[in-house]
Amino acid sequence: MAKLIYSMITSLDGYAEAVEGDLGTGAEDQEVHTFINDLFRPVGTYLYGRRMYETMVYWETAHTEPDQPAHILRYARDWQAAEKIVYSTTLASVSSAKTRIERTFDPDVVRKLKVEADHDLTVDGPNLAAQAIAAGLVDEYHLFVTTSVVGGGKRFFPDGVRLDLELVEERAFGSGLVYARYRTR
């Protein structure tokens, strides 16, 4: 059975999306990006909300921009190879291959996807992840913690959920970003 992984860049104070500006420094570093490439290369399916999909669809054409470094080209190829499911009630069409729209997030359908998948899945974006967390679907949490405190925004973990997790891997990067991987107990 495949794992469902929730992973995002988060501020030091736990926000996956800041009210104003970005989440701080660290994630744009080549060492970090290469690590993320290697970590998520085996993922077979990405589960996105509309807003996250609209951010990530950049990778469909990133390889066509001139002078892209090798690590960016590699991530674009890996992203293009994976299946994408976009959960949206408003998105009329998609602009990437291997992508379909689902109008509602059905935990039973995602459970079946996990059972049938040959490769792990990710759920990306705090709103969609909150639904997966509430349904008990997330097997691992991968946090990429920046060096900034942003003071507000959308939290990485939703309010009202208690999770007891086990730290299974951690790594600090020269940029100051810290990676921590947890699994559910």
Image (spheres, rainbow, N blue to C red):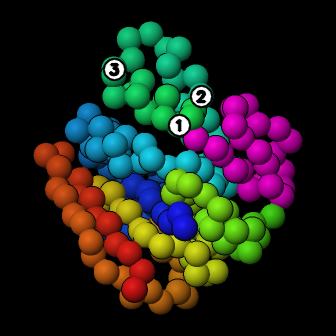
What's the amino acid at mark 2? Answer: Glu
Which is nearer the eye, 2 or 32?
A: 2
Q: Amino acid at mark 3?
A: Pro
Mark toward the viewer: 1 or 3? 1
Residue 106, picture quadrant: bottom right
Q: Is residue 77 above or below residue 40?
A: above
**What residue is at 52 percent from the left and 86 percent from the top?**
161
Is label 3 in a helix, a strand or a loop? loop
Out of 70 and 3, give the one closest to the viewer: 3
Q: State how far apart marks 2 and 1 are (Cα).
A: 8 Å
Residue 154, image x and y in percent? 52, 65
Contact, mark 2 vs mark 1 (Cβ under 8 Å): yes
Image: magenta residue range: 82-103
- In the image: residue 27, left or right of residue 158: left
At numbered mark 2, what does the secondary structure look like: helix, strand or loop? helix
Q: CA distance from mark 3 to mark 2?
A: 16 Å
> Which residue is under mark 2?
60
- Amino acid type for the residue under numbered disc 1: Trp
Q: Residue at x 38, y 75 (%)?
A: 183
Of labels 3 and 2, earlier in sequence is 2
Q: Which mark is residue 79?
A: 1
Q: Which residue is mark 3?
A: 69
Which residue of the protein is positioned furthest toward the top in this rendering?
66
As drawn, 62 above or below 121: above
Q: Quadrant of residue 100?
A: top right
Tell me the mark number nearer the camera, choosing from 2 and 1.
Answer: 1
